[in-house]
Image (spheres, rainbow, N blue to C red):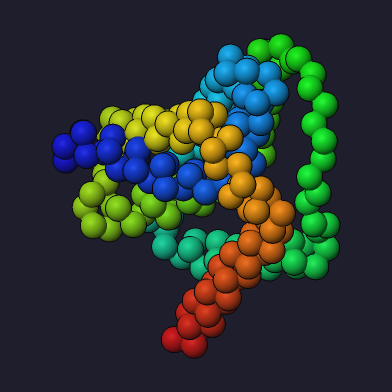
Amino acid sequence: MNLFTSLLLGFITAFIGITPPGLINMTAAKVNLKEGKRSAYWFVLGAVIVIFFQAALAILFAQFIKEHPDVIVLLREVGLGIFASLTVYFLLIAKKPKKKKEIIKKKSTSTRFFLGVLLSALNFFPIPYYVFVSVTLASYNLFYFEMFHVFIFVSGVVLGSFLVFYFYITFFQKIQDKTDYFMRNMNTIIGSITGLISLITLINIIRYYLK
């Protein structure tokens, strides 16, 4: 397979997965507004380093799943419990985000770097996302679980992630009205998404046991 294809696929999947407003890209934009581009780029550097390892781990996990298809059923059941709990939390428990007045404080670049590492590490969604992507691409012979191809694909993921973060840092003020709407309704949006995922997962589990 062409290595450029692996790089391009990694880039595209990362760009699609990270473009919607989320914790990391919104934080990168806010760090830029409060402390400047230097601190924001250090934050992004910490985030993309973790994303690199998350994507690599996801692909290794995807390879294991492909070789042990019986694990998929267990993961679906665990995932149903997780997403159902998240749906209840975001729709019924979590409070509506309130816009607070920002207090500008200068932070060191090392602090922002480790903040990027921490927030990215706490964000577990990239792992199931890249598991799904790699398994799907492999089923169409667009991706192979070989070390060099994996490295090139993950490098594309890092490049795509960095580009999205760069856009948020550079153009955040121009899209702030739209992102403010997202932030005000974030719990409802996330809860609706996790609820839909829970419903689809439940249907798949029921179909499996009715076979």
Q: Which residue lies furthest to the bottom in this view?
A: 210
Depth order, front residue of 198/40: 40
Residue 7 is drawn in which quadrant?
top left
Residue 162 can be seen in this image:
yes
Above or below, 113 relative to 127:
above
Above or below, 138 relative to 72:
above
Above or below, 164 relative to 202:
above
Q: Where is residue 201 in the image (x, y as percent from the top left)?
A: 54, 72
Give the quarter of the figure containing the N terminus: top left
Q: Where is residue 139 in the image (x, y as percent from the top left)?
A: 27, 58
Depth order, front residue of 144/12: 12
In percent of the image, x 52 and y 74: which residue is there?
200
Residue 29 is drawn in which quadrant?
top right
Above or below, 149 relative to 126:
above
Give the quarter of the figure containing the C terminus: bottom left
In percent of the image, x 48 and y 51: which residue is there?
129
Q: For the image shown, how many numbered marks are present on the structure?
A: 0
Q: Position of residue 202 (x, y in %)?
A: 57, 76
Depth order, front residue of 98/147: 98
Residue 154 can be seen in this image:
no
Depth order, front residue of 14/205: 14
Q: In this view, does 186 lie to the left or right of 97?
A: left
In percent of the image, x 41 and y 42: which residue is there?
15
Q: Position of residue 191 (x, y in %)?
A: 67, 64
